[in-house]
Amino acid sequence: DFVVCFVLLQMSDDELNMSPPGSPTAFDDSSYDDSSLPIGVKKTVLSNGSGWERPKDMYEVQVNITGKYDEIIFDSNESEGRPRTYVVGSGLPCKGLDSTFKGMKRGEKSTVVIDSPHAFGPEGLPDKNVPADVAVTYEVELVDWHKVEDITKAKDKGILVKLLDDGPEWDKPKDHDFSFIRYRGRVVGEDKYFAEEGMGEGTEPLRVKTGSILPSGLLEAVKELKKGSKALVTLKPEHAFGETGIPDKAVPANAAVEYEVELVDVHNVIDASKDGGVLCETLNKVSTEWKKPKETSKCSVSWKAAVAGPGSWASREFENLENRSVVIGSAGSDTVTDGLERALEQLVKGQRAFVSVRSEYAFGEAGLEGKVKAGESVEYQVELHSFEEAPSTYSMSAADKKAYSEKIKETGNTFFKTGQIRRALRRYEVALEPFEYIDNIRDEAEKRAAQEIKAACNLNLAACHDKKGDWSQVVSRCNIVMELPVNHNKARFRRAKAYIQLGRLQVKSAHIIHC
């Protein structure tokens, strides 16, 4: 696959569009034959369109058409001053012409000859003076189209999204992300809007947690949009306001509604703690960077910190620091919290973020004297200016790996002694990483040292899980130690204690007796 990609990059445009002898090229669609066209419909391309996309069922196409029979023009939009709009698959303006739309490209001009059964049949088209049972010819230009998709699982057209402008980026918001939207909604068929946000000139878009958008159909539609997209969203009652409607806003029961909506921006929110305790909302993208700091990385950071809650930021702020040096995993600062470190690990150089940190990832029950009370959550505005990459353990010698892990383990011990169990647990996990898999070590002395470190880290992890009351993890970590050729006394004791807590009394005696 890699070789194929390399060859394609070296080919010229002409070479990329080469076709087998006798077949049309990508620039010559004159003999395009859509096998899905019914017998009795013949299309001849007069002018090729651009691109490769073609409209699908339910898309709205804008076309210029001229319809004739016996060289008599019976229909044309030329005097209307704008293209006509048809829905692909609707059978309009006639079944035969509708069947050709899906085979056309944007900008294409074609002549379509349609026999009577696929035109207007025995009834003709009286209001256009088309007699019965005649073949017709259309000259048609596909000017443009709007994608229309039914995004319901049942495909019952309960939520139709008509894409008016496709965004330039690929980001789509998720429930926990923040969306910046402009929208207005009205009952289908009415002119008056019952809801409007961010639509006035100079008005900022609404910042909203995506998962809280209502009604549910609008939420599902927004999650299908890309940043910068504009759409018209049509909702059946069950995806809007159902049997109750909104009486105070003149939305009746069982009303279909439609929204004009623009997704202006998306701020991705990363759950840095995997339990909602540290939520990192990225405020900008840095497309040229991809590396992120990790354990032992030295970072240059600016941040403001405030107690979470109501009121202005200035009234809640307790810290404002610029261009400070932070070593991730270091125990040397009382104000660099676990939550701040976890957030930094999610950022790239030059990125800014708003970070919400629950109490247990901030200052916990101890608080921060005179600044943060016990149990209070905090918020950060943070910018990562730069960082020094942490060393890679893969390229380290056995001695360097041992020194690296011992240092991080000692930091974990410091956190453990001060009751910062979550931070201690993370340090032990990092210290263990170079020694997770040690069976392939051949030097006996190195292997023995690796076994000792692996046992010590797992025992310390068991101690952390003991403090957290996560007894299954205590058993799991002690089991790892029991498989190593080291002293098992601590592992036996901690595992037996966990068995008691788990109610596995039938096995506890065997595991305590040798402690």
Image: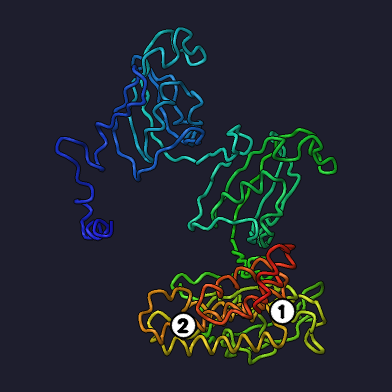
The mark found on residue 291 in the picture is none
Question: Where the C terminus falls, by quadrant?
Answer: bottom right
Label 2 residue SS: helix
Which of 191 and 252 lies nearest the eye of the viewer? 252
Q: Identify the residue at horizontal 58%, vertical 70% (top origin).
A: 479
- Distance Cα–Cα, label 1 vs label 2: 34 Å
Q: Is residue 498 left or right of residue 392?
A: right
Q: Identify the residue at horizontal 36%, vertical 18% (top origin).
A: 114
Q: Which residue is the extreme one toward the bottom?
A: 332
Residue 200 picture quarter? bottom right
Residue 303 is situated, as x and y percent measured from the top left of the image, at 64, 83
Q: Which residue is the extreme one toward the right?
A: 248
* Residue 195 position (above or below residue 159): below
Say which residue label 2 marks: 450
Say which residue label 1 marks: 362
Quick check: can you spot residue 148?
Answer: yes
